[in-house]
Amino acid sequence: MHSESKKDFPAHSKGLGDVRTPSASYLSSEIQTNRAENQKLRQRVLYYAAEVSILAAAIDPLRQGLEECEKARDGWYVPELSRLSEIVERAEHVKRTWYEPQLIARASKIQVLEQQISHLRYIEGSMVFRLINKWVTWRERFSYEFQRRVIEDSELFDKDWYASSYPDIQSFKAGGIQHYIRFGWREGRNPSAAFDTKWYLATYPDVARANVNPLVHFIRSGAGEGRSGRGA
């Protein structure tokens, strides 16, 4: 506020003391000042109104874009997201209930197979495999039927002599040759007077170690090797 000087405020003494009133020039100056301030405020209000209009014009497209995004979200994005979520859940279910158990089972099976292959490779390269293979081949060659045919084709088994020499075999219904093949040679019995089972096994220990029918061995190999079927 403007400072009030005594010359601007003349004194009036009517029982109220020394009271001064503003002069006309002071009031005129105050009015001019207030008008200038009002003009500035008006201009500022017009400026802010223009700014509000600009912002409102910029907000409208944004509002429309937001509404379109919400419509797109509700019309396509949300259903598509729901569909994809269901697909992922089904895939997870398949993985848990089928794929992972299958994978574990196959891994376990592969491990077992690898162990078996390793074990077979070890056996294949070992003496045990060769001995087993030799034993199986020998057993197949000297099976009961094979032995029967070999003995029948020779003249070294005398059925009558065998039956009369060992009357205890009369109850064996398969016949003398089958008895000799299955039990007789192991019991040291002779197939005929021309072949001595005990002597042959004692004389040729390699045949005894092979645990094969000595008569079949003599017919198939021994005679050709110069071995004798009985002692002198």
Image (tube, rainbow, N blue to C red):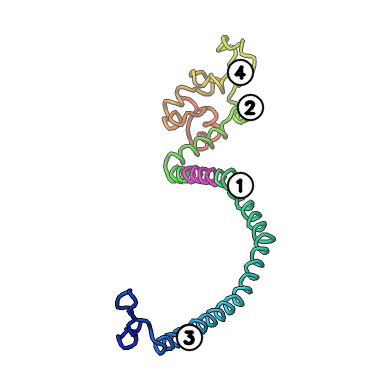
Give the spatial CA distance, label 1 vs label 2.
Answer: 68 Å
Give the spatial CA distance, label 3 vs label 2.
Answer: 150 Å
Q: Which stretch appears magenta?
A: 103-116
Q: Residue 210 in magenta? A: no
Give the spatial CA distance, label 2 vs label 4.
Answer: 11 Å
Residue kind at label 2, given as amino acid type: Glu
The first of marks 1 and 3 along the sequence is 3
The first of marks 1 and 2 along the sequence is 1
Q: Which residue shows up at 34% across the image and 77% down it?
A: 14
Q: Which residue is mark 4?
A: 176
The first of marks 2 and 4 along the sequence is 2
Classify 10 Å Cα crowding around label 4: few (below 14), some (14-19), many (20 and above): many
Q: Residue 107 in magenta? A: yes
Residue kind at label 1, given as amino acid type: Val
Q: Which residue shows up at 46% across the image and 40% down it?
A: 129
Residue kind at label 3, given as amino acid type: Arg
| Nearest the eye: 6 or 96 | 6
Q: Which mark is residue 94?
A: 1
Residue pushed farthest bottom?
A: 25
* Contact (Cβ within 8 Å) of mark 4 with mark 1: no
